[in-house]
């Protein structure tokens, strides 16, 4: 991730992050329909939130990055907004949360914002916050 810190966030970069994270993991290498480093082939869910269908992921991700790159001076709120939208798309079969948090961390560094991470002990608050934002805009 740090090797890309001088580069603008891209679809290829996000897919590469996923490949590095998931390649060679036992559960994923056993399933032919899991495309490590590529978008999901089967529908998935985040709690009770409906995510993008596999046929819409590519266009939804392109739209997300197009929206994001139009912001000239990104704030922490913009990065969080990107993260919430990314998680709602849920572009990969597995590993979306980890990739999304990695992107947030990287984008903070890229935009000269103090990065942060979510500790395991705060994971329930993080998940609840995403759900509240997606369902209530809060």
Image: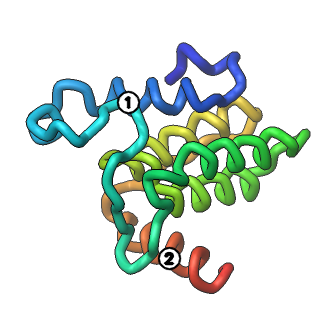
Q: Tell me where residue 99 appears, x and y as whole percent.
A: 44, 42
Q: CA distance from mark 2 to mark 1?
A: 26 Å
Earlier-in-chain disc, 2 versus 1 = 1
Which residue corresponds to the image point at 79% horizontal and 48% vertical from the top-left?
A: 67
Above or below, 101 relative to 13: below
Secondary structure beneath disc 2?
helix
Residue mark closest to the camera, 2 vs 1: 1
Q: Which residue carries the number 1 mark?
A: 37
Quadrant of the image containing the C terminus? bottom right
Q: Tell me where residue 84 appears, x and y as whole percent.
A: 58, 61
Mark on residue 67?
A: none
Q: Tell me where residue 88 appears, x and y as whole percent.
A: 52, 63
Which residue corresponds to the image point at 30% horizontal and 48% vertical from the top-left?
A: 94
Mark on residue 131?
A: 2
Q: Tell me where residue 34 appears, x and y as whole percent.
A: 25, 40
Q: Residues within 10 Å of mark 1 (few under 14, many from 20)?
A: many
Q: Residues within 10 Å of mark 2 (few under 14, many from 20)?
A: many
């Amino acid at each position: 991730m740090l090797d890309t810190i001088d580069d603008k966030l891209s679809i290829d970069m996000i897919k590469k992050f996923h490949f590095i994270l998931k390649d060679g993991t036992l559960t994923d290498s056993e399933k032919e329909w899991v495309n490590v480093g590529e978008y999901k082939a089967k529908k998935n869910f985040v709690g009770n939130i409906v995510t993008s269908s596999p046929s819409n992921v590519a266009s939804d991700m392109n739209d997300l990055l197009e929206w994001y790159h139009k912001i000239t001076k990104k704030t922490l709120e913009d990065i969080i907004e990107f993260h919430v939208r990314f998680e709602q798309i849920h572009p990969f079969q597995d590993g979306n949360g980890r990739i999304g948090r990695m992107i947030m961390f990287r984008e903070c560094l890229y935009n000269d914002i103090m990065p942060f991470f979510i500790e395991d002990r705060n994971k329930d608050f993080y998940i609840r916050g995403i759900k509240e934002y997606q369902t209530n805009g809060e």
